[in-house]
């Protein structure tokens, strides 16, 4: 009898913030595909747009009036699960692929995914320290930093760069799970993110076709 009172699953999928979240998931899925294929520029572009959609789903949700508690809770759960794909699985596969699927890259991939799962579970329970502060480094910062690092890929041999990104991702994972306080970038920072994503998308697009 209780099941009749529950809305259908796709009812939530039609809400604008959740559509935005799902577009982020599509970007991440595309990034995973290109990472597996070894097209790392397109993989980075995919994860950059995943970050952008991840920021905007929350902005849209906060601006919508009349959202119920259930709608908010569903959106939060959807966002969290998508974050594991975008900021856990995608960078892990990118690392594995860039390392030519060498066995020594498997522990690193595990650490990245496990870090994402632990951090998001912790955040779902405790939330922010306050309205403007995270405990530990937010996961989306990892891929924004990784994207910037990839701008310098051409200066290194493939093997050397694979070790560089391995080390960077492990250091970032440590910061993700640390107790340091980091600011939550919001408000006008979203415009900085939009510019960053567009600029890096253009640069990586230029690299691809030149």
Image: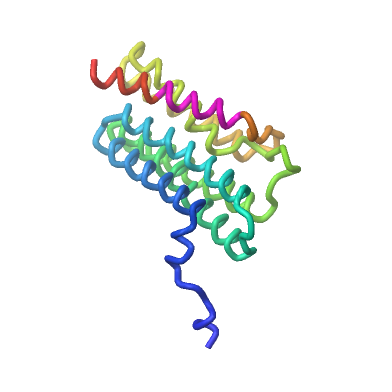
Q: For residue 198: magenta?
A: yes
Residue displayed at 46% across by 43% down: 88
Q: Is residue 104 visible?
A: no
> Against 126, is 37 above or below?
above
Q: Nearer the viewer, residue 137 or 160?
A: 137
Q: Residue 96, position in %: x, y? A: 34, 36
- The secondary structure making up most of the magenta span is helix
Locate residue 95: give its quadrant: top left
Q: Nearer the viewer, residue 15 or 155?
A: 15
Residue displayed at 68% across by 39% down: 134
Locate residue 14: give its quadrant: bottom left
Residue displayed at 27% across by 30% down: 39
Q: Nearer the viewer, residue 37 or 10?
A: 10
> Against 27, is 148 above or below?
above
Q: Nearer the viewer, residue 181 or 78?
A: 78
Residue 116 falls left or right of residue 10: right
Q: For residue 197: magenta?
A: yes
> Against 93, is 160 above or below?
above
Name of the residue lying farthest toward the bottom: 1
Residue displayed at 54% across by 40% down: 55
Q: Is residue 59 visible?
A: yes
Q: Residue 63, position in %: x, y? A: 62, 48
Name of the residue lying farthest toward the right: 130
Q: Quadrant of the C terminus?
A: top left
Q: What are the residue bounds of the magenta stretch?
A: 189-200
Q: Residue 127, position in %: x, y? A: 68, 49
Name of the residue lying farthest toward the top: 155
Q: Residue 193, position in %: x, y? A: 53, 29
């Amino acid at each position: 009898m209780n099941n009749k009172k529950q809305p259908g699953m796709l009812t939530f999928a039609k809400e604008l913030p959740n559509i935005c979240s799902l577009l982020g998931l599509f970007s991440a899925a595309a990034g995973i595909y290109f990472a597996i294929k070894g097209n790392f520029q397109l993989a980075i572009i995919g994860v950059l747009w995943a970050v952008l959609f991840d920021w905007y789903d929350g902005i849209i949700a906060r601006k919508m009036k009349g959202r119920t508690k259930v709608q908010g809770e569903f959106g939060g759960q959807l966002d969290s699960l998508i974050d594991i794909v975008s900021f856990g699985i995608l960078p892990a596969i990118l690392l594995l692929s860039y390392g030519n699927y060498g066995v020594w890259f498997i522990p690193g991939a595990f650490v990245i995914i496990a870090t994402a799962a632990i951090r998001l579970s912790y955040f779902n329970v405790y939330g922010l320290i306050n309205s403007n502060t995270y405990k530990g480094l937010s996961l989306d910062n990892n891929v924004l930093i990784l994207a910037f690092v990839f701008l310098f890929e051409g200066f290194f041999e493939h093997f050397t760069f694979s070790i560089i990104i391995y080390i960077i991702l492990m250091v970032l994972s440590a910061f993700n799970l640390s107790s340091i306080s980091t600011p939550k970038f919001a408000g006008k920072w979203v415009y900085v993110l939009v510019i960053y994503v567009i600029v890096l998308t253009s640069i990586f697009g230029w690299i691809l076709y030149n």
